Image (spheres, helix red, strand yellow):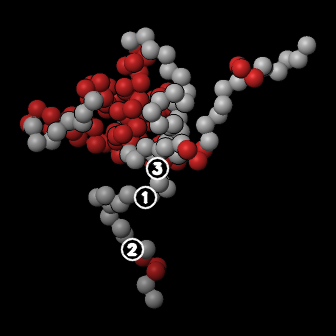
Amino acid sequence: MSSSPSPRHVRPLVSLARVEAFTSAEEAWFWTMSALIARREGARIVAGKGLAPRPCEPDDVVKCLDRLYRQRRIELAHARILRIWGERGTAPDPRHLRERGDFRLWREAMNRLEWPLRVKGIVAGAPSIRLEGAEILEFPGSRA
């Protein structure tokens, strides 16, 4: 008796060439939240059964967020805003006075989540260093 699974029980793997990475951390987050909401409502999440094959599972994005929290790169307030607005399926609008504080936390969380998602290949594109608000100082001994 063979211990290998019979052919009818083996799921074909999706080719990595066909995998569609997300264009931004925001897109990955909304996809993750919709999957988590569906799971909470009783749907079974099965790999490779969505409209587009993705490079991750919803839990992979949550793990990246959890790691940022454990590294103290984001706070509980960031996670709360991501959950609230993720369930709504839209980002906070800074033009509305009541949403400005939420938008600031949302932007901070998305900016910090972008890097680990790019490194893992969940978000398309090579990781880049952002110099937003960074001051570039000359090295004192570099002048010739």
Determine contact: label 3, label 1, CB under 8 Å.
no
Please provide percent x and percent y for residue 16. Answer: 60, 44
What's the residue at 8%, 36% (across, down)? Answer: 97
Amino acid type of the residue tagged 1 in the rendering: Ile
Q: Secondary structure at mark 3?
A: loop
The residue to which callout 2 is attached is: 138
The answer for how far apart the CA atoms under marks 1 and 2 are is 18 Å
Q: Point out the frontmost of discs 1 and 2.
A: 1
Please provide percent x and percent y for residue 8. Answer: 71, 20
Q: Secondary structure at mark 1?
A: loop
Please provide percent x and percent y for residue 28. Answer: 40, 37
Residue 89 lies, with reference to residue 117, above or below; the image says above
Q: Residue furthest top?
A: 42
Q: Point out the frontmost of discs 2 and 3.
A: 3
Q: Sequence order check: which comes first, mark 1 or mark 2? A: 1
Q: Callout 1: few (<14), some (14-19), or many (20+) C-alpha neighbours within 10 Å?
A: few
What's the residue at 44%, 14% (across, down)? Answer: 43
Q: Sequence order check: which comes first, mark 2 or mark 3? A: 3
Amino acid type of the residue tagged 2 in the rendering: Glu
Amino acid type of the residue tagged 3 in the rendering: Ala
The residue to which callout 3 is attached is: 124
Q: Count of labels shown?
A: 3
The answer for how far apart the CA atoms under marks 2 and 3 are is 33 Å
